[in-house]
Image (cartoon, coloured by chain):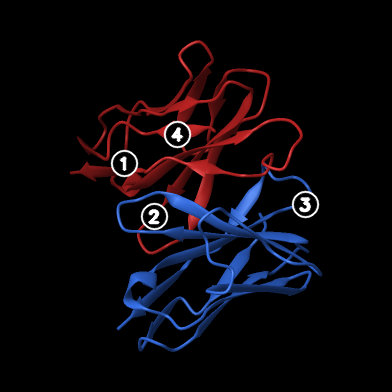
Chain colours: A red, B blue
Amino acid sequence: AQSVTQLDSQVPVFEEAPVELRCNYSSSVSVYLFWYVQYPNQGLQLLLKYLSGSTLVESINGFEAEFNKSQTSFHLRKPSVHISDTAEYFCAVIIRGSGGSNYKLTFGKGTLLTVNP
Amino acid sequence: GAVVSQHPSRVICKSGTSVKIECRSLDFQATTMFWYRQFPKQSLMLMATSNEGSKATYEQGVEKDKFLINHASLTLSTLTVTSAHPEDSSFYICSAPSRPSLYNEQFFGPGTRLTVL
């Protein structure tokens, strides 16, 4: 069974600093990879996803993540964060291919990013 | 993008009562919807897959008789927590793929916080 590990439960940073939120997954087969963001008192929103093709994917608000198959990682980065980026970030995977679990999103425990002025 | 709503956003009930939570796809039809449970500081755990016109598929360890799911139309799925107890207090979230079988593109509702006294 696949699992997702987010190594940091909390990441405090100052505004305009760079940030990296780490995500590792375990799966012996190909996966789809996702980052979701949950702002306070709101539902999850898709931030970016890797399905195939270029291993570097970007979001519209400056985040990017790179799929590294050899390291089974999908770390999320942003070169300069804003206070408005304060939120909980969840990494998730879906196993590619056929079978009953090809729809199942497996989530990491989340990383709370707090951006301070 | 597609919108998924949930009602109510918060509910407080007495132990032993039943609570119904609605999940609606507002601008698209969803033959499949997913129900998750999120404990504080924890990741989302898939509880069950709701299928329009047929029985729900429950994940291992989730009590079918405790968490009743009904998917009566292409835009509405309901989760009823029967005989609720304090340990059922949690954040319940639903999601739906934007198109049939496009499970790698799921949209999430804002969640329902259930508190059982």
Return the x and y of residue B6 as percentages of the image width and height: 55, 72
Amino acid type at mark 4:
Val
Looking at the image, which is closer to me, A84 or B19? B19
Q: Nearer the viewer, mark 2 or mark 3?
A: 3
Q: Secondary structure at mark 3?
A: loop
Real-space Cα separation, disc 3 to disc 1, in angstroms: 33 Å
* Mark closer to the chain start, 2 or 4: 4
Image mark 4: chain: A
Residues packed near mark 2 inside 10 Å, few (<14), some (14 to 19) or many (20 plus): some
Task: Kindly indicate the quadrant of the structure image that contains residue A90.
Answer: top left
A14 over B6 or under it: above or below: above
Measured as percent of width and height from the top left, residue A111 is found at 32, 41
The answer as to whether the residues below labels 1 and 2 share one chain is yes
Kindly report which numbered mark, 4 or 3, lies closer to the viewer in this rendering: 4
- Residue linked to disc 3: B99
**Residue placed under numbered mark 2 in the picture:** A39
The residue positioned 46% from the left and 60% from the top of the image is B37
- The chain that hosts pointer 1 is A
Residue type at mark 3 is Arg
**Quadrant location of the C terminus of chain B in the rendered image:** bottom left
Q: How many marks?
A: 4
